[in-house]
Amino acid sequence: PSPPPGAVAKTDGSANARAGTGAGANDAASAVADADSGRCSLWIDLYTGEPTSFADILEDLHRARVTYLGEGHTLERHHQIQADVVNGLADLGDTLVLGLEMLETYMQPEVDRYGKGEIPFDTLATRVRWSKRWGNYAQYREPMEAARRRGIPILALNARREVVHQVGMQGLDQLSAEDRAQLPAEVVFDQPM
């Protein structure tokens, strides 16, 4: 599939990162207009500075042990690209897990029910009060649906919002033992990712 404009980057500990500033045809590295937005879009290899195809990007990501998919949280086209990457890597036979920072770890039982197909996306959102915890939660539907259709586990990665806020405002030392237990034993603050 030709994904809409957006950005995808990969990290695998090597010097092989590619990012897209848009999408083109799978077999051609030429600028095309996205039918929905009318935007001109093109995938660029950040190391060579040359146009590339989404298929080439998937092949590059396929060789990575870990792929991080970032987005502008409110840009729907970025979320569609995330879903396209999930589907593309699954098509290549990769073993995947979709971890989401916008889901808090206490939500995992409901996320598991969603992943098993026991509840739909909207029920998940209602049960975990996601609209109160993450404003644009609905835009994560596409990558989550892609994972669910493929049987890919979905993990809620973040600590409770209140704990994250307290760490940001007061530091780890001010957390109660109960709140501190929600975080990893070792927390490294100076890593870029």
Image (spheres, grey):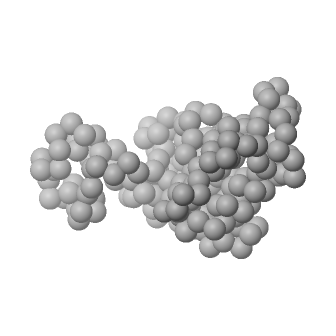
Residue at horizontal 38 percent and vertical 58 percent from the top = 106
Q: Residue furthest front?
A: 48
Left or right of 44 on screen, residue 184: left
Relative depth, front residue between 19 and 108: 19
Residue at horizontal 12 percent and vertical 50 percent from the top = 173
Q: Is residue 151 above or below residue 190?
A: below
Relative depth, front residue between 59 and 130: 59
Residue 178 place in picture, x, y as percent: 19, 58
Q: Is residue 120 visible?
A: no
Q: Is residue 88 visible?
A: yes
Q: Quadrant of residue 86?
A: bottom right
Residue 137 place in picture, x, y as percent: 55, 41
Relative depth, front residue between 10 and 169: 10
Residue at horizontal 23 percent and vertical 44 percent from the top = 167
Q: Is residue 170 above or below residue 178?
A: above
Residue 59 place in picture, x, y as percent: 72, 63
Residue at horizontal 72 percent and vertical 38 percent from the top = 22
Residue 153 place in picture, x, y as percent: 57, 67
Left or right of 183 on screen, residue 95: right
